Amino acid sequence: MIGPYSYSLFLNPRHGTPGVVVLPDGGWRRAKAEITSWPGYAPTPLRELPASPFAALHYKDEGGRFGLGSFKALGGAYAVLRLVVSELAKQGRQVTGAELMSRRDAGDITVTCATDGNHGRSVAWGAQNIGARCVIYVHETVSQGRRDAIAAYGAEVREVPGNYDDAVREASRAAAEHGWHVVSDTSWPGYTEVPRDVMQGYRLMAEEALTALPAPPTHVFVQGGVGGVAAAVSVQLRSMGLDAKLVVVEPDEAACLLKSAKAGALSVVEGDLPTLMAGLACGEPSLLAWQELERAAYAFMAVPDDAAVEAMRVLAGLGVTAGESAVAGLVGAWLAARDGALGLGPDSHVLVFGTEGATDPELYAKLIGTASPV
């Protein structure tokens, strides 16, 4: 547990209402078959944390995913592969994903996206695996460590003034100008198919966790951001017939999903979004994610950065390396448990997703107050 902090909680009045099918099961089966065939695939650990005040508390640790340090490895790289296979087919080249990864010959195809760090690393890795050119746009506050990690996979990294959403717009503009292909983890009207593939990849993380649990969860807390991972978890819960309360947790400096839930419509958080949780510093929800979460999320929360740092230190003491964007869900569970919100108590079986390890080792060491993790 962590000390008391103020937080925002909003119970979703539209929870349980019918909606559109965002992630069809056919696409999920293709994603699972492809990703689980990649060299180095293995389920990431599901760690049991000290449970008080719950019956059980499990933490899905994505720090080791394909050596990229986060769950994003499942989405961007898969979407790159799907897109390039499709584009080559239009050019008369019929190749499978496995053949493309073996040959590493994507022709003159260039992929691009905006990132806070982890998605760009996945897209760059996916492009390198198949021999595609890659250009990644970052905003001004993305750390040098995260930029260097993207460039290590052969991508060109370009800085954009403003915040993450400004970088999204610039990547889209540049793609239109140069004939590149956007591989975004967020979606908007007229651009949904590639982000849908990204989210289908994320479902594998959820399936691994839900399959490994010794008992069904009563509550699932998951990070917000643009909403893609939360929506993927939501869809996977439903597809497996599990009726847990899904709670979406965001930084209080970038709570665009909570704002949308209160407004009953997609809403934008303006400004610099100065949260320490860099991977969640998003002011505009993904259209696809919102179509799922507006009816499937049980509640939305916003939590402070200080609580995230304390949670990182608690986990470090337990031998778990968690980056600053990994712990929002865990923070939400601990804070809500303090006042009995959401029906949390000694009978609760709680699942949270640790969505990244120390993806910026220098920043991690500074926040934890120890040497950088190896």
Image (spheres, helix red, strand yellow):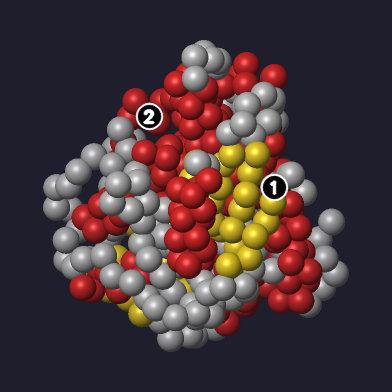
Label 2 environment density (alpha carbons within 10 Å; few <14, some 14–19, many ≥20) = some
- Amino acid under label 1? Ala
Question: Which is more N-terminal, label 1 or label 2?
Answer: 2
Secondary structure under tag 2 reads helix
Is 100 or 107 nearer to us in this picture?
107
129 displayed left or right of 19: right
104 displayed left or right of 195: right
- Residue pictured at 30% horizontal, 33% vertical: 24
Q: Which mark is residue 155?
A: 1
Secondary structure under tag 1 reads loop
- Amino acid under label 2? Gly
Q: Which of the 4 quarters of the picture holds residue 141?
A: bottom right
Is 251 or 51 nearer to us in this picture?
251
- Residue pictured at 71% horizontal, 76% vertical: 367
Q: In the image as oriented, which residue stretches furthest toward the left?
A: 17
Q: Which mark is residue 27?
A: 2
Position in image of residue 10 (x %, y %): 28, 73
Q: In which quadrant of the rendered image does the C terminus lie?
A: bottom right
Position in image of residue 153 (x %, y %): 73, 44
Position in image of residue 143 (x %, y %): 69, 69
